[in-house]
Amino acid sequence: MIGVFVLTGVDFWYTIGKVFFYNNIMEQTNGRGAKLRTLMSKGVFALGVSSAMDAMIAKLAGHECLYLGGYAAAALRGRPDYGIIGGTEMLQAMMYVAEATDLPAVADIDDGYGSTHNVIRTVTDMLTKTNVAGIHIEDQKYPKRCGHIAGKEVLPMEEFLGKLRAALDTRDRVDYSRVVIARTDAFSAAGAKKDPRVGGDIDEALRRGLAYARAGADSVWCEFPTPSRESAKAFAEGMKACMPTLGLSFNLSPSFFWPAEEHPMTLRELQSFGYTFVFSTYPSLLASMYAVYENAKEFRAKDPVEALILLQSKIKGTPVESAMKVLGVDRYQEAERAYSPSAAEKQRTSDGFKGEEKK
């Protein structure tokens, strides 16, 4: 049975404190998380990207927020999201992607890669060595895995609360404008009680979600196994009954099966429930997989020269027509001319891309 919650004294003071804390943060215009907080206060969608190039292209397409997920980072290394990629590899992946544009980005730090000591190190590194505007940490038990792979377990709630508090305290020491999102996988973890109306353990998900919010998380994310309107609404209503000002996060996962004949939830609908940070974890990875596969077939079926000409004709006239332009080669050439006495002459007297061209 879905629990009924009331706004307790603890939640009242939580609400007052968060409003004060949030307003104070918004005054810190130099904080890297300030822009993300502004977007989340209005409701924002973040596109999941896989690489620095993806991030650049997302900005060209007009997106205003990015998501950097562990699934994509692992996939680009030929691994599933199964707890195989460690914190150092994730840090390197996030560093390149987050620095590729000035768009605010939220990074996945999985379960923190170990004990509270590992959480402290991971959060410190992620917030001092990358430009990410926020992070999320989950309550899965090691070895963690993608929330849509069977076999996941969750830590005892108190154990995860210790890790979450370690992450929050570390964030506060480094840059308290950054956003920390707490994720729970309790809804469909091993041993979860299935509520027939919503398809998962909604009571445990709410118990944990409220505890994580009270601990100080800026947003709470409940991972669902399906894009069910009923489960998304039930979790939002349960959270909002106690903490009406809390913003929630929702994963529009590419792992979901979206039946074409049904009427799926929309971004506007999710935002009306109270999900202020809506994101899709790895659509750029899927798009890249499809594009590379189709291109590889063309190069296999045709003469390679014919296939290359066909590829260039497909991208002609688009913002991604020139990899040189997207990567900003012209800016690097300009820097060379500014600091190297012979650069201008060498560029003038040699063949190749010179900024004004498209090759």
Image (cartoon, rainbow, N blue to C red):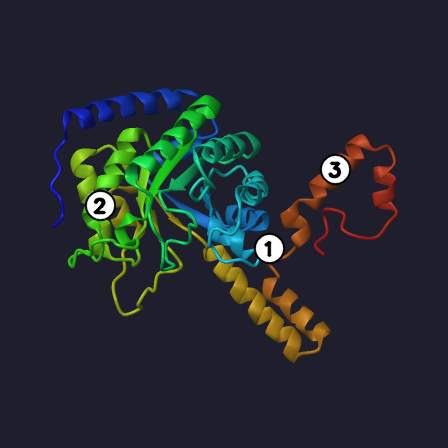
Tag 3 residue: 334
- Residue 336 vs residue 68, the one in the foreground: 68
User: Please, what is the three-letter code of the amino acid marked with disc 2?
Assistant: Glu
- Residue 8 vs residue 313, the one in the foreground: 8
Q: Of marks 3 and 1, which one's residue comes earlier in the chain? A: 1
At x 46%, y 25%, the residue is 175
From the top left corner, tell me how far across and down residue 282 is, in percent.
Answer: 46, 54
Identify the image quadrant of residue 333: top right
C-alpha separation, residue under disc 2 versus residue under disc 3? 57 Å
At x 53%, y 64%, the residue is 289
- Residue 270 vs residue 168, the one in the foreground: 168
Q: Of marks 2 and 3, which one's residue comes earlier in the chain? A: 2
Choose mark 1 or mark 2, whichever is in front.
2
Q: Residue furthest bottom?
A: 301
User: Please, what is the three-letter code of the amino acid marked with disc 3?
Assistant: Glu
User: Please, what is the three-letter code of the amino acid marked with disc 1?
Assistant: Val
Q: Of marks 1 and 2, which one's residue comes earlier in the chain? A: 2
Tag 1 residue: 320
- Residue 96 vs residue 207, the one in the foreground: 207
Tag 2 residue: 204
Q: Secondary structure at mark 2?
A: helix
Q: Secondary structure at mark 1?
A: loop
Quadrant of image for the C terminus: bottom right
